[in-house]
């Protein structure tokens, strides 16, 4: 059973030309796929549609074997798919790193003690315990990017969706992110303009061009 399956997806922003015109793709368990294409092709839009953040104009979205059309259908998707936004500041909003990482587990019904144990476990696993009590908005861009990944992994997702995760990364944090992602078990759907990064993390995938996805 595919983890994600999009069939004949169409989408246009109000008053603008269509972005997607019959895009179809599928992701199997354990797969690591990249979506490549020129700027403005609709890569980030496609990711938001998968997460139910916007509805397609036409076409069907399936996740974990079930059709997803209404807002309620995507609640389960957002629990099982971790989405790392292109801009880390869109995802980090608590005063400290520990609070940001604990936010997801608390929303899933974990107790405060359970959530804090997850915080320590995830930050230790990612080599980020030195950031645990730091004020989030004072972190560097690269540190924010890694903390954003930690907030998503704290939810124990089955799939990771990463939108330009190497933005704002210096060489050290780029290497750290690459090492972390290569060590994970999750299926990964990656949008990245960095060919070397794609080659290491998700060398297979699709090209998005003229509103359609073509397997590469």
Image (cartoon, helix red, strand yellow):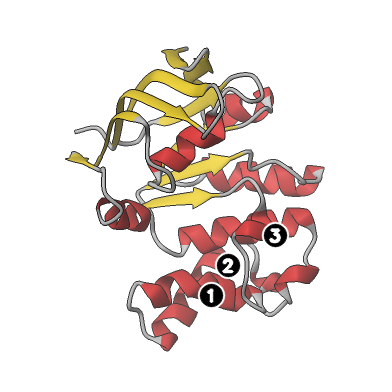
Say if mark 2 contacts mark 1, CB within 8 Å: yes
Return the disc, 1 or 3, that comes first in the chain's sequence.
Answer: 1
Is residue 54 among what the camera can see? yes
Looking at the image, how many numbered discs can be counted on the residues?
Answer: 3
Which residue bears the numbered disc 2?
123
Q: Can you say which quadrant of the picture contains the N terminus?
A: top left
- Disc 2 element: helix
- Disc 3 element: helix
Q: Is residue 22 above or below residue 13?
A: above
User: Is residue 216 left or right of 124 when viewed as pictured?
Assistant: left
Q: Give how far across and how far down residue 134 sits, in percent.
A: 73, 76
Residue plotted at (68% across, 59% down): 89
Q: Is residue 66 above or below residue 113?
A: above
Which residue bears the numbered disc 3?
144
- Mark 2 and mark 3: span between their CA atoms? 13 Å
Circle nearer the viewer, 1 or 3:
3
Looking at the rendered structure, which numbered label has been put on residue 120?
A: 1
Disc 1 packing (10 Å; few <14; some 14–19; many ≥20): some
Residue plotted at (47% across, 12% down): 216
Q: Is residue 213 above or below residue 124?
A: above
User: Is residue 116 left or right of 164 when viewed as pictured?
Assistant: left
The answer to which of 32 and 79 lies nearer the viewer is: 79
Is residue 185 among what the camera can see? no
- Mark 1 and mark 3: span between their CA atoms? 17 Å
Q: Give how far across and how far down residue 70 sits, in percent.
A: 26, 49
């Amino acid at each position: 059973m595919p983890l994600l399956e999009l069939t004949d997806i169409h989408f246009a922003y109000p008053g603008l030309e269509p972005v997607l015109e019959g895009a179809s793709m599928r992701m199997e368990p354990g797969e690591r796929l990249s979506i490549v294409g020129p700027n403005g092709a609709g890569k980030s839009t496609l990711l938001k549609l998968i997460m139910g953040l916007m509805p397609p104009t036409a076409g069907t979205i399936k996740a974990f074997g079930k059709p997803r059309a209404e807002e309620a259908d995507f609640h389960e998707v957002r629990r099982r798919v971790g989405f790392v936004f292109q801009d880390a500041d869109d995802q980090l909003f608590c005063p400290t790193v520990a609070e940001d990482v604990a936010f997801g587990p608390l929303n899933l019904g974990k107790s405060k003690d359970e959530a804090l144990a997850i915080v320590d476990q995830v930050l230790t696993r990612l080599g980020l315990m030195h950031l645990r009590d730091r004020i989030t908005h004072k972190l560097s861009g690269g540190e924010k990017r890694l903390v954003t990944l930690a907030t998503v992994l704290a939810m124990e997702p089955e799939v990771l969706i990463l939108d330009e995760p190497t933005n704002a990364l210096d060489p050290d944090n780029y290497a750290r992110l690459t090492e972390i992602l290569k060590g994970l078990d999750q299926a990964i759907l990656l949008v990245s303009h960095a060919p070397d990064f794609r080659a290491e993390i998700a060398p297979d995938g699709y090209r998005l061009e003229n509103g359609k996805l073509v397997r590469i």
